[in-house]
Amino acid sequence: MSTPPSVETVVVDGLALAQEIRKELSEAVGRHVAAGRRAPKLAVVLVGDDPASASYIKGKRRACERVGMDSSETKLPETATQQEVLDTVAALNADDGVDGILVQVPLPKGLDPKEVALAIDPAKDVDGLNPTNAGLLLQGTADLVACTPLGCMEILRRFDIPLEGADAVVIGRSDIVGKPVAVLLQQANATVTQCHSRTKDLREHCRRADVIVAAVGVPKLVQRDWVKPGAAVIDVGVTVVDGVLTGDVDTEGVQGVAKIVTPHRRGVGPMTITMLLRNTLTAYERRKGL
Ligand code: NAD
């Protein structure tokens, strides 16, 4: 393989960036508490006993604690019915002490995540998955937007990646990552191409892109010769291959070509949790009229 012009590639330290933002969030929470108000509270719901989901929830609750937010966890068994999940959400909607509600996905087979998202009060929908918030996002007026797309945008912003007029390629079109990140990029005045499993010649689309966001779940899909020199590459994908976490981008391969690349560890992941905290603070402030 020929070696393209050498670019000094920055491997984004998503954890360091996340910690910077969490410090700002912690200060904001501190100001509310100092003013005599209760701390913001995130309520998480875990259905079933998928170990990965349990571990994600633990991480989210720990992150809340570290910025001074409250959190609660409602555990439902694998055998929970759709109605039981909806009743849990309804109780949290009605609880004035809860600002954000997150129902961890994937839900066990047979449960409908879209109906659950629809049931969450849009004012407490910190995952941005309720159709009201998804619709407001399309119109550019959403307060609560899906966390991973927000994390991707924050990384681009903090690394001063120009988006105005830039060609951006988003690989993936899920409701939780691909679609909202494409909308956010378009609202930042990028020209966005949304690619997916039926896209013809994905590599050619990527080679033209100033910004690539890969949210697919196919290990090392984006190779060195897919990347234009100087492009920003955001790797959202997380797949476990033989027990090892792997991203959608060949991180090593794009060294010397990409301007920035997020690694699959300490990349977008910590930023996703941080945006969840930010959304919880936003929901709290909006609900209190602050
Ligand atoms: P998804 O399965 O809902 O969507 C995957 C998308 O990729 C689909 O739109 C599909 O059309 C597209 N796709 C599949 N194969 C393709 C191919 N060969 N070429 C082009 N497009 C293809 O997944 P998702 O929920 O959007 O998540 C995507 C990845 O991001 C997963 O690996 C997931 O684990 C990861 N993820 C990471 C974070 C994080 O915080 N780091 C958060 C959410 C999701």
Image (cartoon, rainbow, N blue to C red):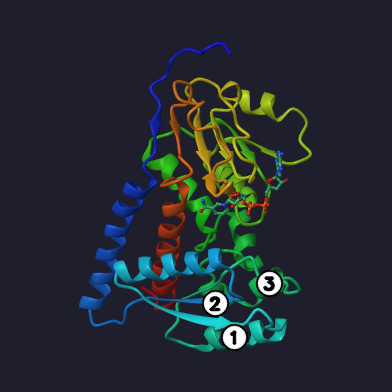
Q: Amino acid at mark 1?
A: Thr
Badge nearest the viewer, 3 or 1: 3
Q: Amino acid at mark 3?
A: Pro
Q: Give the Cα distance between marks 1 and 2.
A: 8 Å
Q: Which image quarter is the C terminus in?
A: bottom left
Q: Secondary structure at mark 2?
A: strand
Q: Quadrant of residue 206?
A: top right
In the rendered image of this protein, does residue 102 appear above or below residue 141?
below
Residue beneath disc 2: 45
Q: Amino acid at mark 2?
A: Val
Badge nearest the viewer, 2 or 3: 3
Q: Residue 110: x and y, percent? A: 76, 73
Q: Residue 83: x and y, percent? A: 70, 86
Q: Which image quarter is the N terminus in?
A: top right
User: Which of the marked residues, 2 or 3, is nearer the chain's N terminus?
Assistant: 2
Residue at image position (62%, 61%) is 134
Residue beneath disc 3: 108
Residue at image position (50%, 26%) is 254
In the rendered image of this protein, does residue 214 appear above or below residue 129?
above
Residue beneath disc 1: 88
Mark sitting on residue 181:
none
Q: Give the Cα distance between marks 3 and 1.
A: 16 Å
